[in-house]
Image: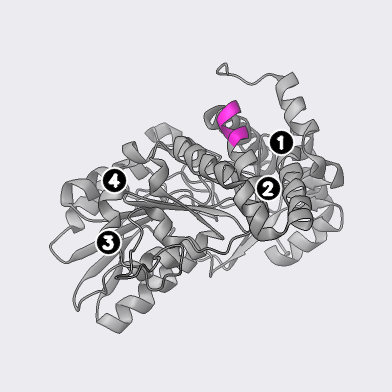
Amino acid sequence: MSNMISADQLAQLRDDTPGLNSGVHLNHAGASLMPQAALQAIHAHLDLEAQVGPMEAGLLVADKLQDLRKHAAQLINAQADEIALMTSGSSAFGSMFAAMPRLNKGERILVGRQEWGGNLANYQRAALAAGASVETIHCHVDGSVNAHALANMIDSRVRLISLTWLPANSGLINDAAAVGKVAAAAGVPYIIDAGQALGQVPVDVQTLQCDVLKSAGRKHLRGPRGTALLYVRRTFLQQLEPAWVDVSSAPISTDAVHLRDDARRFETSEAAVALQLGLAESIKLALEWGVDQLGQVSAGLASACRTRLARMPGITLHDLGDLSDLGIGPQSGIVAFNLRGHDAMALKNKLAQQLIYIGANGIPYTPLDMQARGLHSIARASFSYLNTVDDVEKLARALEQLA
């Protein structure tokens, strides 16, 4: 593909997305719209299951599932045996974290200020039980993680570094590679939550130097809900003992239990194969068109939206990460804002009545950052290359009417 996607190519992508006929979808950070190819793959496999039986159908597409792992690995510059197919970002993270050795008293987990609430809850529970601590890495003035400050926090008690790369409550893009350099130099395991990154920005786990990366498939990657990817670096895998296994992840022979020596030790023998085949089509689309090019379109639309909303009375923007005068940026396809006099959750519902679909986040999603900024909730318009400048204007006009 060329470095720029043409208007005709974008029109083709939109034509291949049936959901665009149902309103203005601005919640791609929550769950995007599947392409026609993914829908067809899901339907075709369900038909096959109905004809020959689910077990038999699964055997017939085993090669396609292995191709899915290969393509997922290609998407993030990993090896196929470092990829596990999971059902959600939370299940991917939870299975991996439960497999890590227990914390000891006095040990420390260092997290970015925008750490996803689900990850943070697991860290805090484990730390409380062990007498360990969870500490927040200091930020730059734009709110992004400060890798230099992180380096100064490292000591022999640091057990883990964790970063939510693109937070759910702003347009910030953290410098995940800079954090990776610090973690690698210190020999500390490094986990990245790439839920908002995968499908929106290029992901290269070698450059990031992370040991674990996880993401749901339903967001900017445009896969079906109920799918996720878990990457575990092969050299880190040997430190992980799954909290539980089944006949797929640890088959029993006549003499012993054999734990798989690849990331599939976190998979189970039971899976929604139809959904995985849908995810395979979404990943193929991302590889074909290029995540960098697609992400530039969504980031441009988000920037246009920020500019439009900034001129409107009653709107307060809550995005982080854009201090261009200091050389900091750019921002992602998420636009966080509030409309004076309107609760974010209620605003989301009011816009949905006009067939304009946005998201809304409360404190539990990004508790450290929300509390640090004194925010109770935010409304969130998240853009994809599927959107247009007309969608920006429809959102702005609807907000003006509500204001």
Q: Give how far apart the Cα atoms at labels 4 and 3 are.
A: 12 Å
Q: Residues within 10 Å of mark 1 (few under 14, many from 20)?
A: many
- Note whether 300 is above or below 171 in the view shown: above
CA separation, marks 1 and 2? 9 Å
Of the image marks 3 and 2, the number of the one nearer the N terminus: 2
Whether the residues at callouts 4 and 3 have beta carbons within 8 Å, the answer is no
Disc 4 marks which residue? Answer: 180
Q: Which residue is mark 2?
A: 32
- First-in-chain label (1 vs 3): 3
Most extreme residue toward the front is: 254
| Amino acid type at image mark 3 | Leu
Most prominent secondary structure in the magenta stretch? helix
The magenta stretch is: 284-289
The three-letter code of the residue at mark 1 reads Leu
| Residue at left offset 60%, top offset 51% | 59
In the visual, does 151 lie left or right of 197? left
